Image (spheres, coloured by chain):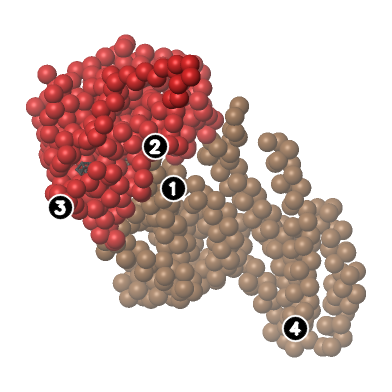
Chain colours: A red, B brown
Amino acid sequence: MSRLEVKKLCCHFATEGGRIEAVNGVSFSLAAGEAVGLVGESGCGKTTLALAVMGLLPPTARVSGSVSFRGKNLLELSEAEKDLFRWRHIAMVFQNSAEVLNPMLSVGEQIAEPLRRHLGLGRREAEKRSQELLEMVGLGGEWACRYPHQLSGGMRQRALLALALACEPEILLVDEPTSSLDPDSREEILRLLAELQNRYGFSLLLISHDLSAVARLTSRLLVMYAGRVVEEGPTEEVIARPMHPYTRGLISSTPHLFPYRDLWGIPGETPGLKLPSGCAFHPRCTQAVEKCRQEAPGLAPLPGGRRVACHRGGIVTLLEAKGIRHEYQLARGRRL
Amino acid sequence: MLGYLLKRLLYLVPVMLGVSLITFLLINLAPGDPAGLILRSGGVEPTREAVEALREELGLNDPLYLQYGRWLWRVLHGDWGRSFRTGRPVVEELLSRFPATLELALAATLFMLCLALPLGILSALYRHAWLDHLSRLGALLGASLPGFWLGLVLIYLFAVKLRVLPVMGRGGLEHLVLPAVTLGFGLAAVYARILRAGMLDALGQDYIKVARAKGLPEKWVIGRHALKNALLPVVTLLGLSFGHLLGGVVIVETIFAWPGVGKFAVDSIFNRDYPVIQGYALFMSVVFVLVNLVVDLSYVLLDPRIRLGKGS
Ligand SMILES: Nc1ncnc2c1ncn2[C@@H]1O[C@H](COP(=O)(O)OP(=O)(O)O)[C@@H](O)[C@H]1O
Ligand code: SF4
Ligand SMILES: [Mg+2]
């Protein structure tokens, strides 16, 4: 049974420069305890998707589709009804930035707020619990009375985790947990995240442009390009055998997964405000055909629980080289 | 912290010296003879000899540096001189009138906050709605209309036409309303805009999104998360506008015949009551510096980034 079911989610922003189609018909589900990765270059709509699930997009956004949780479509709830879900059942680890925590309130006060609001804890209890939460993420209870400006980037990421887990939500959306962290802190945060998921069993949607981080923590992968999911499947398999040309490019440009990044990568640039017609990837695709310019491909199922959105059924293999062994024997006196 | 406080208090010395010197020069540059004015206050034209004798007695015939030096020497020994007009010690005159001025200034500040806080918050929340436009217009008027004009209009409307409030003088709460409104209005309008800008800035920050995500009621998000941050720039500017308030007090007290130090100072200027003018300038510069010190300290206490510094 899936805990969270997102169907045909669209988020369009009305701006002075025209309409931005940040998320364009995304569907996916999160099962209980499942860890799903959402990857894609920056600007492809990952954060917008998460904010839409939380019901936090600004009034300039038009949201359609459905986000089902416990038999309710969250998109149709009033703000007051949403407030009962937010953080209590679905929490989010926001992208780490200097302004993500309120500079005027201590870290403990900020963690205590959802505890008091949703769990009805008193001031004292909430204070004690927020210290425990900070200890749980390896920060130590004494950090509760410190202020955000006293935290380093890595510490802030831990505090954000403690904050998100305050009410022990069933679903956790984590946005770019490793961005702007040094390699050591990145390691620690990834380890901590895996450990916490093990302990609490929440469903995890891990959003990142860091494919190798996602590969370590998730069992299923969604690859997003220009507001659409272009490929979906078991994480290991998608990375080992990408089906969409964009996924292949993404893997090739991830140094942890693919050491020859200079040789591959994705030609061209990410689309700007105006999306290309048809398959949005066609200007950068090496195997585009005429149809790609005209029609947007839908996600079509493939064997092995995988899906790909491509008119050509995914990467076209011109030369199957696997399994072919060529033996050259250098015999004496013979030329090669 | 203590070192900082001492440094700020030490800073009072050059300020007081400068203010008193400039006041002294201005007094002496302005035309008019205190001796003549004092003798004429009896209604009889004095003789030239009488005026000359009084000038000699008051030390007005000495060179300027000697007059200033003598005044400074006495002040340093705690003697602020006596009023030419009343003959009573200057300090006594100022202190006896100061409570009235303080009352007016506090009432004006209170009125200012009662108007500026809700107006600033609401015009940020309902940006470009009618209230926002109204407050923009108010700020324009508040900043451009002279205080005495507003005072006279208010007197005409509420005291002369409607007869609901007294025209002048000090007494109960009803006496306080018109002068306090006159004094506070301009600042209120300006502060409403400053607060609005601060609120808009705060509301755009990530921590507000986080606060909403936490499922907090909107009034917590606004009051606890946005307002706390938006008030910082307001507090920073409060000290500066206190000077504005002191200047306004003089005018408002004169219009409403409010028996405070401001009105007393104006009367003293008309009567060339040199010791009182000097004393008033000195007194007000001390008050100004002290109020600014209090504002700065409260800012330090309010903002944890300054209170605690980095790290530690
Ligand atoms: N509030 C907004 N108003 C207008 N455009 C927005 C807004 N938020 C995001 N966008 C646009 O939507 C697109 C997706 O952004 P985002 O979801 O932040 O991408 P990602 O998280 O994948 O980097 C971008 O083109 C961005 O400029
Ligand atoms: S649909 Fe066409 S352009 Fe898009 S990925 Fe497939 S082949 Fe390339
Ligand atoms: Mg993002």
- Foreground mark, 2 or 3? 2
Of circles 4 and 2, the one toward us is: 2
* Amino acid at circle 4: Pro
**Mark 1 or 4, which is nearer the eye?**
1
- The quarter of the rendered structure image containing the C terminus of chain B is top right
Do we see residue B100 in this rendering?
no
Rounded to the nearest angstrom, the CA distance separating label 1 from label 4 is 49 Å
Quadrant housing residue B53: bottom right
In the rendered structure, the answer to whether residue A197 lies left or right of residue B66 reads left
Say few, some or many: other residues with alpha carbon within 10 Å of mark 3 (under 14 / 14 to 19 / 20 or more): few
Name the subunit of mark 1.
B
Q: Is residue B54 left or right of residue B176?
A: right
Disc 4 designates what residue? B31
Element at label 1: helix
Find disc 3 in the rendering and name its residue: A294
How many numbered discs, if any?
A: 4
What's the amino acid at mark 2? Answer: Trp
Q: Are marks 1 and 4 in contact (CB under 8 Å)?
A: no
> What is the number of the mark on residue B230?
1
